[in-house]
């Protein structure tokens, strides 16, 4: 019943009038995955080297701020590049339509002929599209260049990435923060950190399934394996370096 209601004439008109809305969940999910992976890698490396809670917190906090800002800045610049590319190619297409309109009209004709239009219907489609300069340019950007005209906000994309990175990345540090505040050794702090981070990996991976089409369990388990692999490598590196330094200095 709800599906039928969403496809009434008025409902469709209202939805289309609102225009497409960009979701920043993708930026949040991937920022969170990276934050959890890199911060726990720092924790695992420090634990492998036998470092104390204070050192783990210092390195972990530095990673949260430095790597988090770096990833957010990268996402900001990449999103900004997408926007600038759309603007640049829009200018190019406007110049082509102005200087060689028949050539551009033929491009539209061939694009829609490839979609199965022919004869009078094809010519009508070409006529309608090329009668509106904005529609003409938009059509070329989508069909010839394969661009999405609705690009996300660079600031919002960067903000979502940094927020997710910081939140997910802080979780592996919580047991060590408790250890530091208590002023006494919390023997199981590393194991608590590992368990909490594993849960974050799985939950973020399950959320990622919305974009990959996989089942939530498979996507969550896949992300968990990737995170565990990164943590294991960091732990082995830290433990190996600690033993090497002890044996030679």
Image (spheres, rainbow, N blue to C red):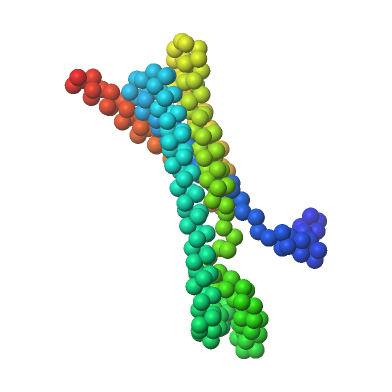
Residue 57's place in the image compared with 80, above or below, is above
- Image quadrant containing the N terminus: bottom right
What residue sits 42% from the left and 33% below the top? 63
Asked whether the viewer can see residue 134, the reply is yes
| Quadrant of the rendered image containing residue 187 | top left
Residue 167's place in the image compared with 138, above or below, is above
Q: In the drawing, does residue 200 fall left or right of residue 10?
A: left
Quick one: which residue is furthest to the bottom in this view?
119
Q: In the drawing, does residue 131 fall left or right of residue 168?
A: right
- Image quadrant containing the C terminus: top left
What residue sits 47% from the left and 57% below the top? 81
Of residue 95 and residue 3, the one placed in the foreground of this image is 95
Residue 37: x %, y % from top left:
44, 36
Residue 123's place in the image compared with 201, above or below, is below
Residue 198: x %, y % from top left:
49, 32
Number of residue marks: 0
Quick one: which residue is furthest to the top in this view?
184
Of residue 186 and residue 80, the one placed in the foreground of this image is 80
Of residue 174 and residue 89, the one placed in the foreground of this image is 89
Residue 189: x %, y % from top left:
46, 20
What residue sits 51% from the left and 18% below the top? 178
What residue sits 31% from the left and 25% below the top? 239
Residue 205: x %, y % from top left:
53, 42
């Amino acid at each position: 019943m709800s599906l039928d209601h969403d496809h009434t004439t008025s409902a469709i008109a209202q939805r289309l009038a609102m225009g497409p809305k960009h979701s920043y969940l993708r930026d949040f999910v991937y920022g969170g995955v990276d934050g959890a992976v890199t911060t726990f890698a720092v924790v695992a490396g420090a634990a492998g080297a036998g470092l104390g809670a204070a050192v783990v917190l210092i390195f972990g906090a530095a990673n949260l701020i430095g790597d988090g800002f770096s990833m957010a800045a990268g996402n900001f610049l990449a999103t900004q590049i997408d926007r600038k590319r759309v603007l640049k190619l829009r200018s190019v297409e406007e110049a082509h339509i102005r200087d060689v309109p028949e050539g551009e009209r033929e491009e539209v004709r061939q694009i829609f002929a490839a979609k199965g239009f022919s004869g009078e219907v094809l010519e009508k489609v070409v006529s309608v599209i090329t009668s509106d300069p904005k529609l003409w340019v938009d059509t070329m950007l989508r069909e010839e260049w394969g661009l999405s005209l609705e690009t996300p906000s660079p600031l919002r994309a960067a903000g979502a990435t940094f927020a997710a990175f910081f939140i997910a990345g802080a979780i592996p540090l919580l047991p060590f923060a408790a250890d530091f505040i208590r002023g006494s050794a919390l023997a199981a702090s590393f194991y608590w950190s590992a368990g909490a981070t594993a849960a974050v990996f799985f939950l973020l991976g399950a959320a990622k399934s919305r974009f990959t089409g996989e089942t939530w369990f498979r996507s969550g388990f896949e992300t968990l394996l990737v995170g565990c692999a990164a943590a294991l490598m960091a732990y082995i590196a830290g433990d190996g370096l600690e033993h090497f330094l002890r044996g030679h200095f």
